Each structure stands twice: as C-alpha cells, then as structure tokens.
Image (spheres, helix red, strand yellow):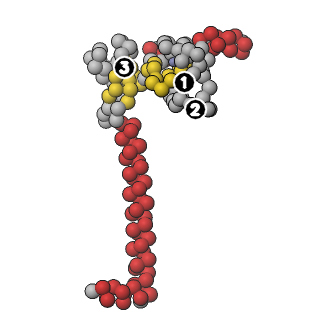
Amino acid sequence: MIEKIRHAANTPAGKVTAGVLLLLALIMLIWSILSNFGSTEAASLTSARTFICTETGKVFTTSLREGWTVPVPSPYSGKNTGVPAEQCFWTKEGTLKSEPTYVLLNEYLGKSDPTFCPDCGRLVVQRNPIYRVGDPTARPPPTREEYARRKQNED
Ligand SMILES: [Zn+2]
C-alpha cells in the first residue's frame, strides 16, 4: 500500500494530487487558526460584560445573550435598566490606578452634558480608553473645571 502511494507520488498526476492535498491541508490549518481566533474574540464580547443599573447605580456583570439589546435586565431593579458601564482608571491627582471605577454615562440617562467620574472627577466618554498603570502614552482626561475652562477658551 505504502509502495503504491510512493509510486503514485512519483507520477506527474500523483505529484499534483499530493501538492493539492498539501495545499488543502495548509488552507485547513490556517482556517482553523483563524476561526479559533474568531471564537475567542466573540467569546470575550459575549461573556462577562460590566453593566450599571440606571435606576440603582449598582454595577453588575452579565453575559449578553442572543436577542438581548441594551438596556439589559438589571438584577437590582428587576427591569431592563442595565447599560454598559465605562471604566475610569484615573485618580484625582491624575495618576493611574489598577482597579477601575465604573461610571454611568449621562447619555444613558437622557442627559446631554458630559459625564465626569464620581471618583476622580475627570471626563468619561463612551468606550473610555482603558489604561494600565505605567502606560507612558496615557494622558489624564480633563477634570470638570479644566473642561469648563477649555470650553470657555473655545467660545
Ligand atoms: Zn475616575
């Protein structure tokens, strides 16, 4: 049997078949790696996400289930009042901390004014940048006062 394959591989047609099989194997390999990447990424999106209850201000994590839309059910209010919580990694002094403060954005409350972190008093926006302690590129967002001053200068 092995002899037969070896023989077949030596014929031009056999070489083509072997080449095609090798190519297919390679494609399958790449495809399986890529699809694995996809599934881990999808998993991180659908698994534990942090929400904040607009009614109680309490933070909770929940897995987004198929068919769920924001706001998601909140275990604290028993209603659909859970909205994505933004993470703020700043302190009043303008340094980074390792544990974030979870912030409820004003826009989820139907308010148009910017949101400031209840802990450090700095500006928090949607998809607030996530920084790790020691990140040299991190610049602290403006405090309420700095923000107001900036706005004044613009006008
Ligand atoms: Zn903060």
Tell me the element at label 1: strand
| Residue 62 percent across, percent down from the top left | 32, 28
Circle 1/circle 2 CB separation < 8 Å: yes
Query: What residue lies at 36% left-to-right and 41% top-to-bottom?
Result: 43
* Image: 77 above or below 42: above
Classify residue 8 by image quadrant: bottom left
How far is the residue under mark 3 from the one under mark 2?
A: 26 Å
Query: Residue 59 shows which numbered tag?
Result: 3
Callout 1: CB less than 8 Å from ligand 1: no
In the rendered structure, the answer to whether residue 54 lies left or right of residue 143 reads left
Q: Amino acid at mark 3?
A: Val
Callout 2: CB less than 8 Å from ligand 1: no
Q: Earlier in the sequence, mark 3 or mark 1?
A: 3
In the rendered structure, the answer to whether residue 153 lies left or right of residue 44 reads right
In the rendered structure, the answer to whether residue 29 lies left or right of residue 75 reads right
Q: Which residue is mark 1?
A: 96
Q: Which residue is mark 2?
A: 135
Closest to the camera, between mark 3 and mark 2, is 2
